[in-house]
Amino acid sequence: KLARSKGVSEAWIIWWHALRNALIPLISFAGVYLGTLIGGVVIIETVFAWPGLGSLAYESVIWRDFPVIQGVVLVIGTAVLAINLVVDILYAYVDPTIRY
């Protein structure tokens, strides 16, 4: 209401105020979804016989190759942590009231 009373255009009000507040749950959902997507790569690569990290994990579980399993889990865990870090940084960028 204050922005409208100051004469700010409707497009700027929607872009600056409404969209930035609506992006916070969208960023949260995207971070969780990307983590799930990385976790589901094992199933997709096994079903479609694509070579990659998921099929490597599957084959190493079948052949009980523990160092490779540990490496795959480490890489996937690091990717999920990196996604969560990016989500937290985007929170502070989108909503300046969030301070770390």
Image (spheres, helix red, strand yellow):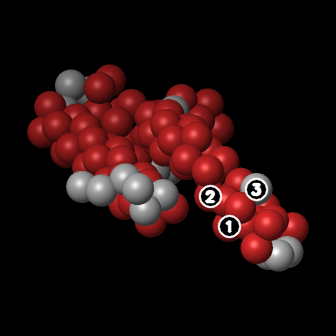
C-alpha separation, residue under disc 2 versus residue under disc 3: 17 Å
Q: Are marks 1 and 2 in contact (CB under 8 Å)?
A: yes
| Residue lying at the far right of the rendered structure | 10
C-alpha separation, residue under disc 1 versus residue under disc 3: 13 Å
Q: Is residue 94 left or right of residue 8?
A: left
Residue designated by label 3: 1
Q: Secondary structure at mark 3?
A: loop
Residue designated by label 2: 20
Q: Nearer the viewer, residue 1 or 59?
A: 1
Query: Looking at the image, which residue is at 76% across and 73% down?
Result: 6
- Marking on residue 16: 1
The x and y percentages for residue 24 are: 55, 47
The x and y percentages for residue 9 are: 85, 75
Q: Secondary structure at mark 2?
A: helix
Q: Amino acid at mark 2?
A: Arg
Number of residues whose C-alpha sits closer than 10 Å to that of mark 2, classed few (under 14), some (14–19) or many (20 or more): some
Q: Confirm whether residue 71 shows in the render.
A: yes
Number of residues whose C-alpha sits closer than 10 Å to that of mark 3, classed few (under 14), some (14–19) or many (20 or more): few
